[in-house]
Image: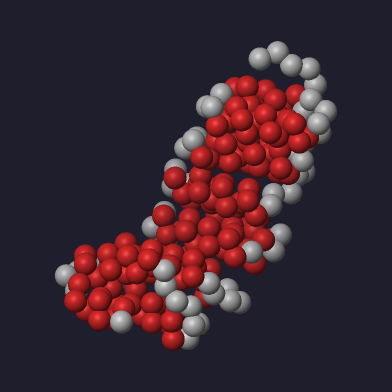
Amino acid sequence: MKMGLLLNVFVGSSLISMYSKNDEFDTAIEILERMEEKDMFSWTTMIVGFSKRNKSFEAIGVFVRMLEEGMMAGEFALTSILKACASVLGFREGSQVHGYAIKTSLENDASVRASIMDFYVKIGDTFSARLVYDRSPYYDLVMCTVMIGAYAQNGNTELAIEMFHQMIREFKIFPNEFTLATLLASTAQTGDVILGLIYML
């Protein structure tokens, strides 16, 4: 695709999104490079495009470039890049993103915090996920479900059930179908299906 210098940030970002969805990443990158001005949305659109197509290393590369050029990352960029880091087990990169979230106070955003927890869970670091959970000033269904899932993956039925109880009794947060399925998977892995069903009542 031949193009001149793109002056309109909105048009450029829209084109990046369109070409990314069609797996035409060379063109999407060319558009990003030729944009006279790039804002947070432009960079994030490219990061999301790579991340959704499982091009995690490319997403991480764009994220690094965005920061190097002095652009601040927002909540959506962080949640997308954390998924990319988790998919390639990028502990160092994901930890650095977590540090950035703390420095910019974006860790206080519920979606970012849940994504940080999910990153640690997916790379097998339940301890760090629990630290993020325990530091939270408030709790929501997504965060609780992430921790229940973390314990379920490790076969730690007792902690999964304990977290489930805390969610309902202490935080007054009620589970959805996904939370219940996650807990049931944990109890089923250890043969405690009946026990799991009883605890759900």
Residue 49 lies in what quarter of the image?
Answer: top right
In this view, the residue farthest toward the bottom is 169
User: What colour scheme governs how the chains and residues are painted in the rendered image of this protein?
Assistant: secondary structure
Q: Quadrant of the C terminus?
A: bottom left
Q: Residue furthest top?
A: 2
Q: How many marks?
A: 0
Residue 35, percent from left and from top: 77, 28
**Viewer-nearest residue: 58 or 162:** 162
Who's the residue at 70% across and 13% down the image? 2
Any part of residue 193 in sight: yes
Q: Is residue 136 above or below residue 53?
A: below
Which residue is located at x 21 percent, y 65 percent? 189
Q: Quadrant of the N terminus?
A: top right
- Residue found at x 71% / y 38%: 42
Q: Is residue 57 visible from the viewing direction of this image?
A: no
**Residue closest to the eye, 184 or 35:** 184
In the depicted structure, whether residue 48 falls above or below residue 74: above
> How far from the left and from the top, in percent, is residue 79?
57, 52
Q: Viewed as shown, does residue 146 lie left or right of 45?
A: left
The image position of residue 27, as x and y in percent, is 63, 22
In this image, 179 relative to 185: left or right?
Answer: right
Using the image, determine if residue 89 lies above or below residue 17.
below
Left/right of residue 36 with respect to residue 114 in the rendered view? right
